[in-house]
Structure formats: C-alpha cells, structure tokens
Image (cartoon, rainbow, N blue to C red):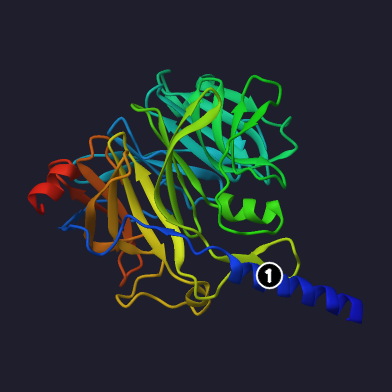
Amino acid sequence: MNKVLKFQIGIVTLISLLTLSCQKNRSHNRFSDSVETVMLQGNNLYTSSDFAVRWFVPSLGIIDNSEIHMRSISNENLIDVYQLTEDSLVFIHSFLRRGQGPHEVNIFGAFHDRKNETLTFFENSGSLTKGYQIDLTVEGGVQNREAWTHIDFTHLREYTFRNSFAFVSDSLLLAIGGRFNSPNILSLIHLYGAGVVTPLDFWPNDGFGGSYFIKQAVYMDNARIFKNFKQDKYLYVSALGKLMVIFQIENNKMINKNTVVEILPQYGVMPDGLNFSIAANERNRGFRVFTTDRYIYAVPLEFSNEELRSRRSRSDGFDLEFNDNMYVFNWEGTLLGQFVMDTPFVSFVVSEDDGTIFTHTMDLETGDCIVRKYSLHSTPTQIFSYGSVN
C-alpha cells in the first residue's frame, strides 16, 4: 500500500473516531424498569407437524380477525397465510411469488390498509421499482389477479427508499427515504404526480457532521413507519438507537411531532467512507413494533455487534433477537406499562381489538416453530390499572 493511500485511510479513520466521540449523547426516554409490569401466561396454538415459517409479517398482522400472514421459507413464495381459530392455525395458501415477472417481487415491503381493505406490496431492489395493491373486497382476494393494481416507480431514479411506507391518501404515500445524499429521511410520494416527491422536515439532531448519505443510511435502514387510521397519526421507529416519533401530515408537511423515546444512535464512518460503523458494545438496536388504532406495542432489542459475532445466546438458551418483554404506549406517547411473556419470542402481532397477542417462538429442544397465544380479556389500559391477567 503506498504512503498516500495509507495517509488517506488514516485521516478517514481519525475523522470517524472524532465524529463518533463528538456526537451528542441525547436521551429522552419514557420507558424504564420502574413501570408497572404485568406477567402474561400463554398457550401454544396447534399447528401441523411440518409448520415452519420465518416470522410474522408485522405490517400485515391479522386480516379480518381470521388470517395470519407469515414470511414463508419457500424459495418460490414469500407469504404463507394461515386460518386462525380459537386454538389452532391451519395453512390456507401461499402468495406473492418470488421473481421478476408480472405479480412477482423479491425484496418487498407491505402495508395493510384496514380502512380501505387493501394490501399493498412494493419491491425494493436498492430503490423502489414497482408495487401491487390488492383490493380485499374483490372476490378471491389475493388469489384473484383482477384485484391487483400495478404501481410503477421507475421514474424515481434520484431517490433512495426503504421497505416501509403508509398511505396518507389514495394518491399520497408516506415513505422512509428521500433524494440521495440530502438531509432527508422521510418523504411524501405523489403517486400520480409524474415523479413528484415532497421531503419532510425530519432530520435528527445527533451532532453528526459527515456525509448526508451516511446519516440517511443510519436512520433509514430497517426503520419502520406505522399508521393510526382513526386519528391519522403516524409513527416513525428507528432500528439503531431508540427513536420513536409520533406525528401527523397536513398540507404535505409534518406537524404535531411528539418524540416518545429518543436515545440517538452513536455511529461513525467506516474507512471506506461509504458505510457507517457502530461501536462493538453498542446495545441499543431500536424496537420491534406493532400498532393498533389504540396502542403502540414495542419490544426493545438490546444486543451488541460483539455479542452477535461471538454467537452468544441469552442465559435461557434463546438467540439474542428473542425477547420476553413488551412496552405499551398510547398514541399520545404515554407509556402505560410493560408485559412480560412466559416464553421469549422473535416476532409478534396483536388483534385489532387489543384483546390477544400472538408471538412466534421456538422449542429449544426440537427447534420447532411455535405460535403462542396470550389472551388479555381487556384492554391494556384496564390491565395496567387493575392488575395482571391469566
């Protein structure tokens, strides 16, 4: 390696370390171990002996209180649909084929519009390319191709987006993303506006002074957007640090921002100058979230890159991505309390009436996938006010 190249790499590394050490360590935290905790006991749902899925599709959840959507382990299909009964899950069909042909996608994001009864899927192969919206009111649902409307994104070449989005209206899409290398991580896509994209004023003040595209990646990669259909509110959740912000959209602008949790990520720049780095012992990795129109359910992820590299497990034998505690907020950002499940889980969904939580876990002895059901019998507000449930 020549001296000039060594010097350049050294300078980049020094800048990275300085950037990492000089960031503001802001903390706005409304969840702690001191909140009211309720222990939940669940039961396993019966499934067939060959039941094997990756995890719930949290952006879809439970359709019409009777169908649960799971990520498929198939090399051909992306989603498996199961009929939900009182004590079992029965496989119905698979859909959304993997590929490049009509009605096929590869890496995708999904959105269930409970108000308009549609499912929407967008393919993202580095940038948005195409999408399909499925009208669930049409006979045959996802199996009826006449119910699928194609959406074209090939004109959005100057923008970078991720796999999470929500409809503001039939023609307006709220998405994680923005113009490449700009101070923008949330945008409104005007679906019928010939490529018109409106950036939203949302750029966390974390003290990072490096390239915009590095910061964009930090706050866009694996971040999520959720919608409250009754109040027209939206929730942004980061995947690094712990940042949850509730807001509304009016006249193409973000208004009434309410920061629920703000533990901003600590990060720097890799020697290549193109990627971000996080400290090996940084354990704040955002939340897994599911929302209903009443509540926000948030499961904290807290494990470091060092722990992942060493393939360390939890003390109970489950992988690090499993957790057994869940915080519940309302859409005003108030923390109501904490559920602690009897079995750690890796993903979850909640019924629309907030009466049931379903978790995806596993049998440590056999490695079998398990869906566990927790019946609340009342709303979280009542539970945290009046004590635990069985």
Q: Name the quadrant containing residue 352.
A: top left
Residue at horizontal 75%, vertical 36%?
157
Tag 1 residue: 16
Crowding near the residue tagged with mark 1, few <14, some 14–19, many ≥20 C-alpha atoms within 10 Å = many
Residue at horizontal 71%, vertical 56%?
211
388 relative position to 201: left or right: left
Residue that lies at the very extreme toward the left in this rendered image = 386
- In the figure, 298 relative to 295: above or below? below
Which image quarter holds the N terminus? bottom right
- In the figure, 85 relative to 306: above or below? above
209 relative position to 93: left or right: right
- Camera-side residue of 79 and 192: 192
Q: Could you say where residue 308 lies in the image, as x and y percent from the top left? A: 49, 73
Q: Could you say where residue 217 lies in the image, as x and y percent from the top left? A: 63, 53
Q: Is residue 155 visible?
A: yes
Q: Could you say where residue 71 lies in the image, as x and y percent from the top left? A: 45, 48
Number of dots carrying numbers: 1
Q: Is residue 45 visible?
A: no
323 relative position to 175: left or right: left
SS at badge 1: helix
- In the figure, 208 relative to 63: above or below? below
Q: Could you say where residue 298 lies in the image, as x and y percent from the top left? A: 34, 52
358 relative position to 285: left or right: left
- Camera-side residue of 291 and 343: 291
Residue type indicated by callout 1: Ser
Residue at horizontal 61%, vertical 29%?
189
